[in-house]
Image (cartoon, rainbow, N blue to C red):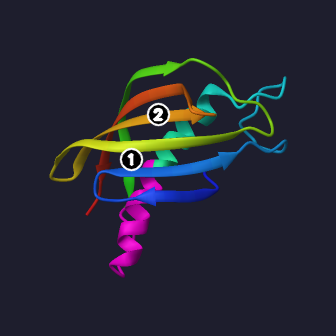
Amino acid sequence: MVDTLLHTDEQQTSCSLTIQADNILLTTDGYFSEAGLIESMAQTAAAGTGYKAATQNTAPPVGFIGQVKQCRIMQLPKVGDTIVCTTTTTQQVMNASIVSATVSLKDAIIAQAEFKIFLQE
């Protein structure tokens, strides 16, 4: 649920997604669903990890989400909208990360959540 990796560094990753009419996570009335927003946030975090692995010529680690909390969905984007997801690693202990995520539409935050992500080594 990402089209383009916009930025990544040690702490933050940003990706964009333009909502297409054939997206599997659309609601019946043409809006990108809550599940789609959460999936886009998760894939943004994964894109940053994958990019870092690629620059180090290593395979990307397998990861899984252990927890999603403080999830707030304020607005659903519609077909044709472009959203920007930004994830920020706020805490890292061994193979576990706490990641704060936001989704923006035209400079307004429309969703946010916190993820606990575990990477297998």
> Mark 2 near mark 1, Cβ–Cβ under 8 Å?
no
In x, y percent, where is residue 74? 57, 17
What's drawn in magenta, residue-wise? Answer: 45-61
The answer, for residue 88, to whether it is visible in the render is yes
Mark 2 element type: strand
Tell me the amino acid under the disc marked 1: Phe
Classify residue 60 as left or right of residue 28: left
In x, y percent, where is residue 18? 71, 46
In x, y percent, where is residue 75? 63, 20
Quadrant location, the C terminus: bottom left
Image: 21 above or below 4: above
Which residue is the site of mark 1?
64
Q: In the picture, residue 57 is in which quadrant?
A: bottom left
In the rendered image, the residue lying farthest to the front is: 107
Classify residue 33 as left or right of residue 27: left
Classify residue 116 as left or right of residue 95: right
Mark 1 element type: strand
The answer, for residue 1, to whether it is visible in the render is no
Using a 10 Å C-alpha cutoff, classify the residue at mark 1 as few (fewer than 14 neighbours), some (14 to 19) or many (20 or more).
Answer: some
Image: 14 above or below 82: below
In x, y percent, where is residue 25? 71, 36
